[in-house]
Image (cartoon, helix red, strand yellow):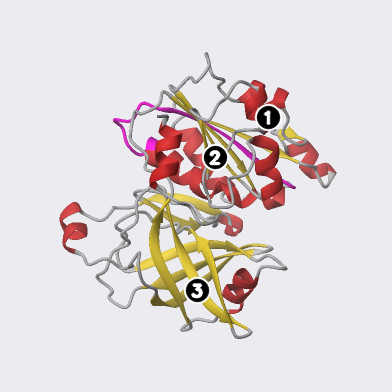
Amino acid sequence: MSAAARASRKWIWIGAGLAVAGAGYLLTYGPGKKMVLETKQSTGQSQAASAPDGLDPNAFRPLKLSNIKKYNHNTNIFTFTFDDPKAKYNGKTASCVVFKTNVNGKDEIRPYTPISRPNTIGELEFVIKNYPQGLMSKHVHEMKKGDTIEIKGPIPKYPYEANKFEKLALIAGGTGITPMVQMIEEVLLNPDDKTKVTLLFANTTTDDILLKESLDKLAQKYPDRFQLHYTVDKLTDDKAKKAWKGEVGYINADMLKKLLPMPAKKDDESLLAMICGPPGFMKLISGEKTKDYKQGELTGLLKKLGFTEKNAFKF
């Protein structure tokens, strides 16, 4: 059985959230309030081992909103604290959590991925985009400091193992960057993991690219291990056209062949493609998951390029 199939059978993913994480990193603001990554001391193993779990995968717990930072025109960084300040985030790569709140008398449940690394003490941070029709995202963006929301987790998505693959080909659209950055950092921040990672990140415009500064910094720090590519549907003005060095246009087969590693043979399991994005994006690249969240048949551009169910995984 393929690695992708084993992961699909073991874990059921319930949705796509928005956020990324950085082991030993702290998200801070640089000039112009752009998000950058700065190194910081990670929680010691002994401290993390003795710390209680901040979340319960089987029950919702109330977390208090302690801080809000504006990220861009429609996205903020939200910090939620555990009731116990000594508790740790007990998630692993790649995992998400589930938010629950009541909207108009009905419980709304949505998944999000913390930007906090596993074993972070005392709090969880999330980068959340405000969608006009998104009931949960709208609710979170209307929250004020001191408000609480119920959170359950962690919910595993993919049980990554170091050096399981020679290459990872990651294809993300919009908020589908979430699990991709988890995967990238899990590989790069482990000096014993020799896996080569390539990311193709698609967005509508340059203003919509989330966490670009942190991705760029990782690409600069690990040039031999991480190749980073962007594409946008359109460039909105002359300034953007002059400054842009990425691709322009929708992802197609030629773009994938140009930028990503391709399978050397049928069912090549030295390579794994991972895909995450909105429904239309998934349909184009790989086909969507089944209604019961199984991997389903691989279709789309990846199938045309020689990928199979044994070397592709849909988040």
Determine crowd level at label 3: few under 14, some 14-19, many 20+ residues with C-alpha closer than 10 A.
Answer: some
Q: Quadrant of the N terminus?
A: top left
Residue that label 1 marks? 301
Q: In the picture shown, does residue 4 fall above or below 303?
A: below
Disc ID at residue 190: none
Task: Give the amino acid at mark 1.
Answer: Leu
Q: In the picture shown, does residue 64 fall above or below 109?
A: below
Asked whether residue 189 is drawn in magenta, I would say yes
At a point 67% along the width and 49% down the height, the residue shown is 279
Q: Nearer the viewer, residue 189 or 269?
A: 269
Residue that label 2 marks? 216
Disc ID at residue 100: 3
Q: Earlier in the sequence, mark 2 or mark 1?
A: 2
Task: Give the amino acid at mark 3.
Answer: Lys
At a point 64% along the width and 72% down the height, the residue shown is 135
Q: How many marks?
A: 3
Work out how far the residue at label 2 is from the one at label 1, CA to CA, in angstroms: 26 Å
Q: Position of residue 45 (x, y in %)?
A: 19, 52
Q: Which residues are magenta?
A: 187-204
